Amino acid sequence: MRLSEEYCLSEYQELGSLNGNEKVHIVRNRINGLICVRKHLTPELLDIYTFLKNHPNPYIPKIYECICEGHELIVIEEYFTGKNLEEVLREREFSFGEAGRILVDLCRGLRPLHEAEPPIICRDLKTENVILTNEGDVKLIDFDIARIYQPGKVKDTVMMGTEGYAAPEQFGFGQTDARTDIYGMGVLLNYLLTHTFPSEKMAVGRMEPIIRKCIKLNPEDRYQSVDELENELQNELKDVLGENSENGRKTQIPVQTENEPFYKIPGFRSRKFWKMCVAVIGYVLITTICFSMEIMDANGQLLPLSRLMFERFMVWLSQILWVFFVCDYRGIRQKIPVVNHKMRIVRLMGYIVAEFIFLFGAAVICVFVETFLS
C-alpha cells in the first residue's frame, strides 16, 4: 500500500461494526465529519469497485476510497439511513406502483454497469441488497459476488448466487451476463408483490407477463437488456410514474411511517405540492357535490334533514372509497385482477364496475337503516 493510500485510510475514525458484521464498519472522516461505511473485501473485486468509484451512479452508494492492503480490498463508501426491502416487507406490503417503480430504478442503476466495457454483472439482486432510504431513494448496495463478463467463456469459474433469486446459469448452466440480472429482477418483483418466489406463488395482474418473461430458463427468451425491461415496466406504470418516468429521471418511492398518517392518503403520498393542491381541490369538489344533492322519497318529496344528511354522507363515502380504490390506497387495487389487467379498456371497465358497486353498497346501507328505523 502506498503512503498516500495509507494516509487516506488514516483519515477515517472507527465508530464500530455495522449490524455486527466484522467486515463492515461505520467510520467518520476526521477532516469533514462525513459518516461512511468501510468494507473489507476480496481483492478480486478491485476492478469492479474502481469502476463504481470512477462512474458515480445515483442508485449505488458513492465510492470514496478503493485501496488494496495485503490480501484484502478496503472500500470506503457512502452511508445513508433507511431499510432494506425485506425489512420494509415485514411492516407493510408494496403496492403495484411502488414495486414497479423500484424495478425501474434498478434498471437505471444497472444500465451503466451492463454497458461498461466489459460489462459488470451484479448477480445478487435480492430484497436484502436493495435499500429504501428515508428520503425515498432506491440504492443497490452489495456487489460482493459481482463479476466482469468475459466474452467467449462457456460458464462462470465460481458458481455463486442466492437460492431463489439466482438464474440457472449461476449454477453452471452457462456464463452469467446482463440477462442474469434481469432474471433476478423478475424474481425480486414477484417477491415484492407476493412475498414469495415465483416457484411458490406467481403474482397476478399486469406484472405477471413481465415476471414470467424475466424468469425464462433460457436467457434468449428473457428481456435482452434492462432498457427493454424498463420500457415494458413504464408502459404498465405510466399512469403512476407520471413525469418521473421520462428522461431517465430518478423516481422516489414514498416512505410510509406511522408518524405521518396523512402521507398515505391519495394525493399526499408523494408530498409533491401540485399533487396535494389537486387532491385538495378534488376532495373539496366531491364533498361539495355530494352534500348539495337533493334526494327525494318515493312520493317526490325532499327527505327530512337528518335522513337527507345521512344519505348524502353515504354517497360521499362511496365516492371517497372509490378514489382510494382507483389510487391503490395501501395496495387494495392490486388484489383485484381485473383492474390490473394488461389491456387499458379492461381496467377502465373494472373502474366503472367498482363505481357502481360502491354506489350500490351505499344505497343498500341507506335502505337498511331506513327499514330499521321505521
Image (cartoon, grey):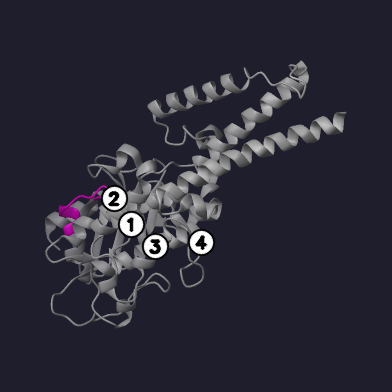
Between disc 1 and disc 2, whose residue precedes? 2
Q: Nearer the viewer, residue 4 or 101?
A: 101
Instruction: For marks 4 and 3, give the CA distance.
Output: 18 Å
Q: Quick check: can you spot residue 124?
A: no
Residue 195, label in figure: 4
Q: Residue at x 27, y 80 (%)?
A: 158
| Quadrant in which the N terminus appears | bottom left
Q: Are marks 1 and 2 in contact (CB under 8 Å)?
A: no
Q: Amino acid at mark 3?
A: Pro
Task: Look at the image and give the residue range highlighted in magenta.
Answer: 51-62
Q: Residue at x 22, y 56 (%)?
A: 111
Question: Within 10 Å of the Cα at label 2, are there few (<14), some (14-19), or many (20+) other Cα atoms?
Answer: many
Image depth: mark 1 or mark 2 in front:
2
Instruction: For marks 1 and 2, give the CA distance.
Output: 9 Å
Image vertical order of residue 275 relative to residue 222, above or below: above
Between disc 2 and disc 3, whose residue precedes? 2
Give how far across and how far down residue 295 sits, in percent: 69, 21
Q: Are marks 2 and 3 in contact (CB under 8 Å)?
A: no
Q: Nearer the viewer, residue 157 or 5?
A: 157
Q: Amino acid at mark 4?
A: His
Instruction: For marks 2 and 4, give the CA distance.
Output: 23 Å
Q: Quick check: can you spot residue 18?
A: yes
Question: Within 10 Å of the Cα at label 4, are there few (<14), some (14-19), or many (20+) other Cα atoms?
Answer: some
Image vertical order of residue 152 relative to residue 204, above or below: below
Image depth: mark 4 or mark 1 in front:
4
Give how far across and how far down residue 187 sits, in percent: 40, 65
